[in-house]
Every structure is written in structure tokens, then in C-alpha cells.
Image (cartoon, rainbow, N blue to C red):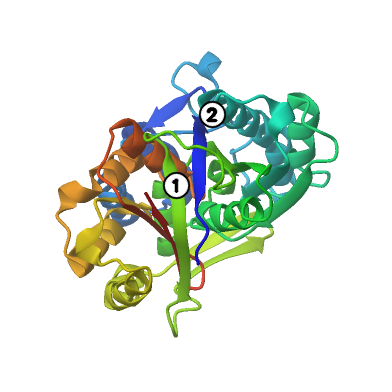
Amino acid sequence: MSVSAPIVGIGTALPSNRIDRADAEIFTQEFCCETEEQRRTLAALFRRSGVSQRQSVLLDSSEGDLALRQNFYGATSPTTAERMSAYEQHAWPLALSAATSALDDAGLGPDRLTHLVTVSCSGFSAPGFDQTLIRRMRLPLGITRTHLGFMGCHAMLNGLRVARAFASTDPSTCVLLVAVELCSLHYQYGWHPERVVANALFSDGAAAMVIRSSTEMSRPDRFCILADGSTLIPECAEAMSWRIGDHGFVMTLSPQVPDRIAQHVRPWLIDWLGRQGRSIESIGSWAVHPGGPRILSAFAEAVGLDRDQLAASSAILSECGNMSSPTIAFILRRLRDANAPRPLLAIGFGPGLAIEAALLD
């Protein structure tokens, strides 16, 4: 018998300052484009990105036009060491804001937490931001820590799987799941079409969720995790990748990704949902990770959805950009607050090419 687990709190956080699409395009031209043809192509990519604005920890309101700090992105591309130093400085405050918001949303104090699960693919440091959260939030020093690293955009769903597993072992379990990504630290210099697409899409953000044992009473306006699923699309290992380079982490995003997802996602969903006693038609709402507008369109067409059924995903992409792992939580909170129909299916895609999903009610 599957074990359910209620999500009793959701919190989100964004950097204080944002940049709109036009300014981001102008900035990107400075370090990516050398010819007029490249500038025209870049402009088209930004128009089609679905991102109207995005937030970054590298934006400073004191600079007036919110240009990215010239002492970070300037004449030469920052090294990976410099980018990781910025990650260590900026990741924990954003994670702390999201975690505090999630606990407030749950109406719980930090002393109630038994497990801390952290998620990030955009930076490394040890000790990590998990230990900073323990100190800053005054969490129990004996809290059980688990970190999920370098899994990509779907990793919040992996975190939900881990939290649900912990919650199934003891009725007193209370898990804080925190994801933070600083994708703007990994802007790439030069004209590489796949990397330029990543420059047009990704942004910074953090999100957190509080998950309890199924023995806890869950309010009707809270989601409950019923099941999770995972699969790899065959022969797609290099279609999407995320590797460490000398100048940041380098994203490879093949233009074939939407088509590969469209080919494989519907048959897998039919099989997986069938094993849960559900069908595609029975799903009331969808939280689809917005890897980009083409991915959303391909998913909707393959599964047989109207684009308005993915309105929450499209809106978060437009307002916040692709924040990688925290993005799903932003969509879930919006759907929860809108009292969206249940059951809900959350699904994301990541390097590999991997599909992760969770069924919520």
C-alpha cells in the first residue's frame, strides 16, 4: 500500500531586484554576440523565451538600471572558483527566506522539525547552506540532514520523494525540504547556440516545503503526496546535460528535447498513472516544470491538454524565469492558493533525459 504524506507548508523567495527581458537581452549581447546576425538571433531567442523578467542575486538597485554588477561579469568571464564564492555568499540568505516562509505557512516552529532535505545544482560548498540554516533558524542540532545535489530542474520532486519516505517511517516526522538555485552565476560568454538559450531562460530563486507524516491531520487546502514516479528517456543522455567547466557550469540543451519529451511522456504517464488507479483524464490540475515554452507546448500537445491548463507554469516562467529546482514549488503554491482542482500531477524534466513526477491530492 502506498503511503501518503501531507505538504503542510510552502514558502518561496526571490532576490530583491529584477531585470526585464529587454535589459537582459542588451546585457547578453555584450558578452555573447560578435555579429549583427548573432544579435538578431539572440533577440528572437529572448522574445520566444517566455520570460518577461527575472531575478538575480547579482542585481543591485543602487546601480539604477539594474545592470549586472560589472565587478562580476565584465571584460573576462569569471572563473568557477569566483562563481562558487558568490554562491556561498548568496545561496543561504535566499534559502533561509524560503524556509522561514514555509514554516510560517505551516504554522510550525523550528523545534518541530526532525529532518532537513536540501536541494541545489548550481553551487557547491562545504559546510553547505544546510548547516547555515540549522544555525540561523536554531534548528535542532541533531536534525537528520540529506542533500540532493546536481540533479537539475526536476530535483524538487526527488526531494519530495525523499521527504515522503522519511515521513512514512515515524508519525512524529516533520521534514523541511529546501531548494535554492543561483543560475545567474552561470551565464556563459561567447556564441554557443545551446548556451545562449540557457542564458535567455534561467534565473535565481528558492523554495521550501514542510512535509508531515500521514498520521497528521491535513487541512483540505493542503496537498498530500500520494505517489511518485521516475523514468529515463532512452538514447537521450546528451540531449540535456549540466557539467562543470572552468568558467561556471555549462548547460547543454538540444533543440530535440521538446520532441523527445513529446514522444515518450504520454505512454509513460498512461502506464504510471494506471498503476495508481488513475488516468490522464482524471487529473484535475497540472504543475509542469517550464523548461521553456517549447517544452510546455510539446507536453500539452502530447498529453492532450489545452494551453490554459498549463497557465500557472507559463505565468511563473514569465514572472520569474526558469529557476531550476525551486520552480515546481512556485507553481504548486500558485495552484494551491487558487484552489485548483484535484488530483494534481507535478512533473519535471532534467539531465539524462530524465522525467520525475508526483501525484498530489
Identify the element where label 2 is drawn. helix
Residue 156: x and y in percent read 53, 51
Q: Which class describes the residues within 10 Å of circle 2: few (<14), some (14-19), or many (20+)? A: some
Q: Look at the picture and state if 3 lies above or below 217.
A: below
Left or right: 309 with respect to 53? left
Left or right: 171 with respect to 336? right
At horizontal 57% and vertical 49% (from top left) the residue drawn is 186
At horizontal 66% and vertical 61% (from top left) the residue drawn is 245
Left or right: 217 with respect to 103? left
Q: Which label is found at residue 224?
A: 1
89, 224: nearer the viewer: 224
65, 268: nearer the viewer: 268
Residue 192 visible somewhere in the drawing: no
Give, as a three-letter code, the residue at label 2: Ala
Q: Which class describes the residues within 10 Å of circle 1: few (<14), some (14-19), or many (20+)? A: many
Q: Which residue is mark 2?
A: 106
Asked if the residue at tag 1 contacts the one at tag 2, i.e. Cβ–Cβ closer than 8 Å, the answer is: no
At horizontal 81% and vertical 33% (from top left) the residue drawn is 140
Residue 9: x and y in percent read 51, 33
